[in-house]
Amino acid sequence: MKIDFIAIGKPHDASLQIAIAEFTKRLQHYASVQWHIIASPKKTATAEPEVQKREEAKVLLAALEPTDWVILLDERGKLFNSVQLAQQIEKWQAGSKKLVFIIGGAFGVHEQVMQRANIIWSLSNLVFPHMIVRLLLAEQVYRAYTIIHNEKYHHV
């Protein structure tokens, strides 16, 4: 199984980099994992949010393969507890060779990206800074794999 994490924005914050790297390393035990941090197109820095989202969508959609199972993170998405997430990941990976988790830009993602997503997932009803979402995503996907493999990391 391959897992790609794609995030629009700046490189990982130094204060969170060690933790993100640690969970990414742990996750490598179960799958081939890559982070792709995509900078917002420079010409959109002062653009209206819709223009910025449209330009980011071009880059995001170009990074996807037709067979990728795309999980878009969005605060309005479906909520799962950890066990439910593990069950979903098992289903998602059964039908695809690569899972792609997308964290959009500061203004979210364009409708085209929403339409391309196979599922829209919310980590929480709360809104988090994008850098913290990266850490939460890596940890929760790692936790899901430990649940799938009946390992001791997750405690009920």
Image: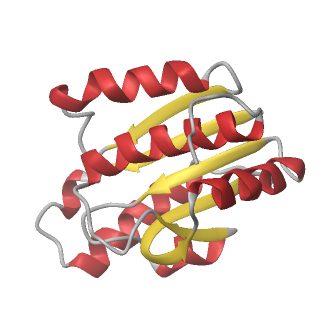
Spot occupied by residue 126 in the image (x, y as percentages of width and height): 29, 71
Q: How is the image coloured?
A: secondary structure
* Residue sitting at x 51%, y 18%: 25
Quarter of the N terminus within the rendering: top right
Side of 113 relative to 70 (left or right) = left
Residue found at the far right of this picture: 95
Between residue 154 and residue 113, name the one nearer to us. Answer: 154
Which quadrant of the structure image shows residue 116?
Answer: bottom right
Foreground pick, 78 / 2? 78
**In the foreground, 41 or 38:** 38
Q: How many marks?
A: 0
With respect to residue 110, does 68 lie above or below?
A: above
Q: Percent position (x, y) of residue 43? A: 21, 58
Q: Tell me where residue 128 sits by quadrant.
A: bottom left
Residue that extends furthest to the front in the rendered view of this protein:
156
Q: Quadrant of residue 34?
A: top right
Residue drawn at (40%, 68%) of the image:
124
Image spot of residue 141 (x, y percent)? 57, 42
Q: Position of residue 59 (x, y in %)?
A: 46, 54
Q: Nearer the viewer, residue 137 or 86?
A: 86
- Drawn side of residue 118 relative to residue 33, left or right: right
Apparent side of residue 33 relative to residue 88 in the rendered image (left or right)? left
Point 73% across, 59% down: residue: 88
On screen, residue 153 above or below 134: above
